[in-house]
Image (cartoon, helix red, strand yellow):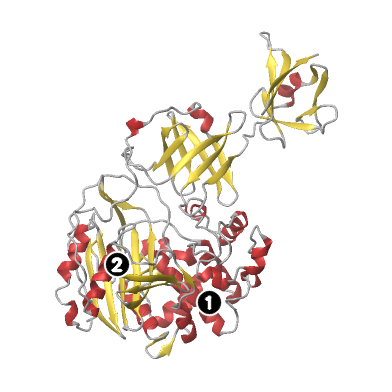
Amino acid sequence: MTVPRINRWISCLCCLIFAAVATAQTPAKNNKLEKIDAALTDILQEAQGAGFAVAVVEKDKVIFSKGFGCRDMTRKLPVTEHTRFAIGSCTKAFTSTLLGDLRKEGKVDFDKPATTYLPALDFSDSYLNTQVTLRDMMCHRTGFSRYDLAWYLFETDSRDSLLKRIHYMKPNAPLRARWQYNNFMFMVQGMVVERLTGQSWEQNIASRVFQPLGMSESSIGTIALTAEEERSHGYEFSREKGINEMKYHPIVAMGPAGAINSTVTDMSKWLITWIHGGKYNGKEIIPADYVKEAISSQMVIPGGEPDTKTPYIQFANYGLGWMLLSYRGHYRVEHGGNIDGFTALTTFYPTDSIGIVVLSNQNNSAIPTKVTNLITDRLLGIAAATSPKAKPGKKDEDPAPHRDSASRAHPATHPVAAFAGVFKNDAYGNFDISVKRDSLFATFPDVTWYLNQEDYNIYSPYDAADTAIDVKYKSNMRVQFLMNNSGDIDRLSFAYDPSGDPVIFERVPQQVVLSAASLAPFVGAYKMASMPIQIKLSDKQVLTMIVPGQPVYTLEAIDGSTFRIQGLKEYKVKFIRDDKDKVVALTSIQPIGSFRAEKE
């Protein structure tokens, strides 16, 4: 599961990685993988990773299974083939497999509208309710970009709550016109499974996959991972701060898209099943027709042509929960996973009957791909092109741009307090921006950001939990505050999704309640030129404004003397007092100007 994130900058001294192996089972020998340990250790060192585990299967045998480096760098605990890792989006193939199982039972048709099975699903465009199928969701061709912040920052344990947010999401491409990765659509698949079976997605994964395959070392969610004795901690690497530990990111409602934890020992059983057309130990676990369909091309992924970085790729497509490509002429099926502190890659070659799983505890890491390619080349007898070794950290460093904060040219347009408030987007949720010691902080359910001003009203976010923040290092995310025609900060923009437009959050009007006694001095008759204006106190103890020929307006207090006009954005009324604190006039503030009315 690839997600957006804010870089953490906690400085720590970490031990150099070391190879550690513990085998409870004896893998079948394969001479092609002899003396490969040193090369795998080199990959770990070059990437400045904490650790990883790898298992290799050939037909129905595990031929290699080892751990390298640390699962806990503080206590120097080694990774073994029984170490639990979060596997992120490698979960997706499990979720779609459940639908394959239900199709065999005659309970679902991939090519019928998804609303057939989940009526609560409601797109903003009613046409999509009758057209978007489960197959569209299974191969990422619904026309929706990622919208990942909607679940990643605005967390909830309720799938129903996340489902409702889909109504407010807007497609940025026609249906089936473009491949666009979307985690929400895999959550929907999980909800369809729940509705058709009467059991939770988690229960279905356990009963239909884990138990039949004997995947006793697998679990779901960060609570379960935390409870495991041999769990891996998650880490990230940056050139500035080295290796830092990251806290687990809870995935509950979005579980069907990426919440499984596993070991390479268990994942090797999953690979053997796919290599054998859905059978494990001679028993069909995954329907054979579904296996064939899932690893067949359903949607083209742009950028599948070879280039200087990947000269060995000839195409890139997506099946059902699996990515498909040609690796040096061999048909390759794989899916990666990335969630805070972990990167995984599950790969198999159907026609070569080999599979490789690599689970690492480094965030957004190239380690799994490098390890997979190295082992593939050995097993297939391919003389891979070599390149000079990278210096530590060069290959896996965060590619976020560096900018010197000294280059900031302009101050913000408003005092810092003017940016504080609650901001809302129905597809995401609400969050609060507050001022602490003249600095802005954005608070979400699981994280608080410190917002560092860059230029004008553009801010760069940092994890406020970090004890040391290097403002020279910018994340790839920006927050920009926007003004209305009256010059008030009324919106902000998140720029984070490379395939989608910036996300606009509207400022929620501040609610100020004034007593009837406080409102009484404003009541009376006013005149603007020759136009009379009446301010009255309603039975509900709120002010109303009456202008001839216009509807009655309700005034909502912003502070002790300023009111917004309900239903009219950017229209306000400000009452004026003299030096004796007597209300003598009002000013009607409008986008086209301000107009004074004297009290009679």
Disc 2 versus disc 1: distance between alpha carbons?
Answer: 35 Å
When the figure is inspected, residue 569 is found, relative to residue 300, above or below; the finding is: above
When the figure is inspected, residue 546 is found, relative to residue 108, above or below; the finding is: above
When the figure is inspected, residue 171 is found, relative to residue 482, above or below; the finding is: below
> In this view, which residue lies farthest toward the top?
579
Image quarter of residue 275: bottom left
Q: Position of residue 265 (x, y in %)?
A: 31, 75
Q: Is residue 88 left or right of residue 489?
A: left
Which residue is at a point 21% across and 68% down the rendered structure image?
385
Which residue is at a point 27% across and 63% down the rendered structure image?
367
Q: Is residue 142 left or right of residue 339?
A: right
What amino acid does circle 1 point to? Leu
Q: Secondary structure at mark 2?
A: loop
Q: Position of residue 324 (x, y in %)?
A: 40, 73
Which residue is at a point 75% across and 30% down the rendered structure image?
542
Q: Which residue is mark 2?
A: 311
